[in-house]
Amino acid sequence: MKIARFDDNRLGLVEGDQVKDVTAALDILPRVGYPLPLHDPLIAHLDAVCAEIRRLAPNAQALPLAGRTWLAPVANPGKIVAAPVNYQKHLDEAREQVEIHHNNQVIEIQKIGLFLKATSSLVGPSAGVAIEHLDRRNDHEAELVVIIGQGGRNISRANAMRHVAAYTSGLDMTVRGPEERSLRKSVDSYSVLGPWLVTADEIPHPDQMDFSLHVNGELRQKANTRDLILDIPHLIEFASSFYTLRTGDLLYTGTPEGVAQVHPGDVITTSFVGIGDMTVAVRSSK
């Protein structure tokens, strides 16, 4: 099932070139008060919401995909976990290009580990990317994003996929420079997510997914998730060995070679087999 958040916080079921407005399915979510939960309520009740969507869909209003405002399909992730240099060819290019490594040692993911991006950097595709620090190189990075369903700590690789609720496409933007990754990748709008999520049952082989990224129609990145250095189960095991993963947490799995600079006025398009296309406009934050 493809589930979207669109326009004025509407909930949609994406089918072909239409989205069905099934916002009423959100009525089954429990009301929350302060203190707020440390997880995303939609993902926490995803099975029940999906059942309600199926009930509502036959009579739901169908709208064209064109002209919609696409929001991040997960509204309240507790944290955004990200995997650096998780494709060998990207590791190689990062070591070769001074514009990427900025005279810092580029260490293998097995040694350097994962990093966190600020949740304030999260936006949907229609919000676009607002480039900060125009005097520096700002790069695009296309990534498959895992949405955690069942949370947990010290999750084994053997059980890791049971903790996945859904998948979506992500754009991990980064400002090049000497600072820590977490800072340079946490600029407002530098974590793009969408245009919708796809429940895990519809993507049986996330480890064999073709994807690509174009800028203004020019192919920049093309890869398959089979080339991940640390695959999805390994990433979940690795992350949960340091902190509890909670329902709705996002795991950006890493980007392949071909990262490059974008400028205000550019249009980025990602395409993930089984998910779809995501179009993101680039502008200046000033």
Image (cartoon, rainbow, N blue to C red):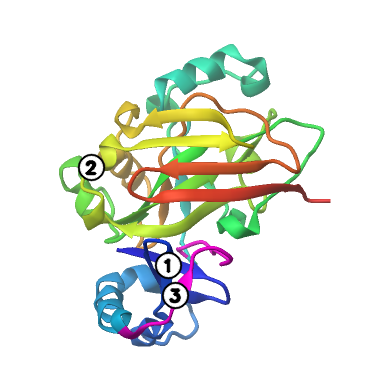
Choose mark 1 or mark 3, whichever is in front: 1
Q: Is residue 253 visible?
A: yes
* Residue, disc 1: 18
* Residue, disc 2: 205
In magenta, the rendered stretch is 59-74
**Mark 1 nearby-residue class (10 Å; few <14, some 14–19, many ≥20):** some
Q: Is residue 244 visible?
A: no
Mark 1 to mark 3 CA distance (whole Å)? 13 Å
Q: Of the numbered discs in the image, which one, if any, rests on residue 11?
A: 3
* Amino acid carrying mark 3 in the image: Leu
Residue at screen point 37% across, 61% down: 16
Answer with mark 2 or mark 3, whichever residue precedes in sequence.
3
Mark 2 to mark 1 CA distance (whole Å)? 25 Å
Answer with mark 2 or mark 1, whichever residue precedes in sequence.
1
Q: Is residue 133 left or right of residue 86?
A: right
**Mark 3 nearby-residue class (10 Å; few <14, some 14–19, many ≥20):** many
Residue at screen point 30% across, 40% down: 232
Q: Estimate the x, y position of residue 252 in percent, counting from the top left.
A: 44, 44
Q: Estimate the x, y position of residue 123 in percent, counting from the top left.
A: 58, 58
Q: Estimate the x, y position of residue 8 in percent, counting from the top left.
A: 58, 77
* Mark 3 element type: strand
Residue at screen point 55% across, 51% down: 192
